[in-house]
Image (cartoon, helix red, strand yellow):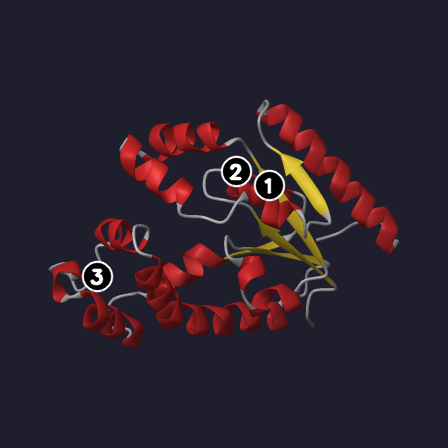
Amino acid sequence: MAARYVIGLTGNIGSGKTVVADMLRGLGADVIDADQVARDVLATGSPEVDSVIERFGDDLLRDDGSIDRAALGRIVFDDAKALADLEAIVHPATRTRILAHLADSNADVAVIEAIKLLEGPLVNQVDGVWVVTAPAETRVERLVSQRGLPNADARQRVNAQNPEADKVQRADVVLRNDGSLADLRQRVNEEWQKLIAKRGWRNAG
């Protein structure tokens, strides 16, 4: 049985959407992390790995047969055409796996967490769009402090993305993440309760 309601969770890099996804998981949602699915698609020995090496060069291939994701990121986040080429390789298989997960889910609420949700066909699979936002400087600081990126790389990744306003314009729910974790959790809980009440469910999960 497929999930009865699907939230599309998105936000620019460093906004905190993964934190929100974890909160929704704790409330009982079945969360699908599109980035993790994409990592699985690029697992050692997959045809997508071969395509990436063919397009971007065998310098990206580690000794164990995996892709050097950091080096790949430096290439694609500085070149829109390269990023589009990478997405053309990885996204179809990623979508296929996500749709299979959704079809098998028996949760009342499923969540697709995806940074490029609104730019592709996955948006057609969701019932509501939740967008997590944070100021650009805050997002840069998070990438540096939490992911260990050099400041220049963090700014490159933040600047490479579409403006937050593009996502906010299409959102059903906007979660501004520029305060405390407790503030964010309160907002998530409020929106969750609204959803449950609107759908007429006593419990979700």
Residue 80 sits above or below residue 182 on the image: below
**Of helix, strand and loop, which one carries label 2?**
loop
Q: Is residue 187 visible?
A: yes
Between 20 and 136, the one lying in front of the other is 136
Question: How far apart in space, not on screen, are marks 1 and 3 (Cα)?
Answer: 31 Å
Q: Is residue 159 left or right of residue 112?
A: left
The front one of 90 and 104 is 90
Lower sequence index among marks 3 and 2? 2
Report how far apart the C-alphas of labels 3 and 2 lie in the structure: 27 Å
Q: Identify the disc placed on residue 132.
A: 1
User: Which residue is located at x 29 percent, y 51 percent?
Assistant: 73
> Which residue in the structure is indicated by mark 2?
16
Amino acid at circle 1:
Val
Question: What residue is drawn where x is 26% and y is 33%?
Answer: 150
Residue 41 visible in the current orientation:
no
Q: Is residue 123 left or right of residue 97?
A: right
Amino acid at the residue labelled 3: Ser
Of the image marks 2 and 1, the number of the one nearer the N terminus: 2
Q: Which residue appears farthest toward the bottom when viewing the image?
A: 47
**Along the viewing direction, whichever of 49 and 44 lies nearer the viewer:** 49
User: How many labels sit on residues?
Assistant: 3
Circles 2 and 1: CB atoms closer than 8 Å = yes
Q: Relative to 140, is 77 above or below?
A: below
Amino acid beneath label 2: Gly
Residue where numbered disc 3 is placed: 66
> Is there a contact, CB below 8 Å, between mark 3 and mark 2?
no
Mark 1 burial class by Cα count in 10 Å: few <14, some 14-19, many 20+: many
**Image point 51% across, 43% down: which residue?**
18
- Looking at the image, is mark 1 or mark 3 earlier in the sequence? 3
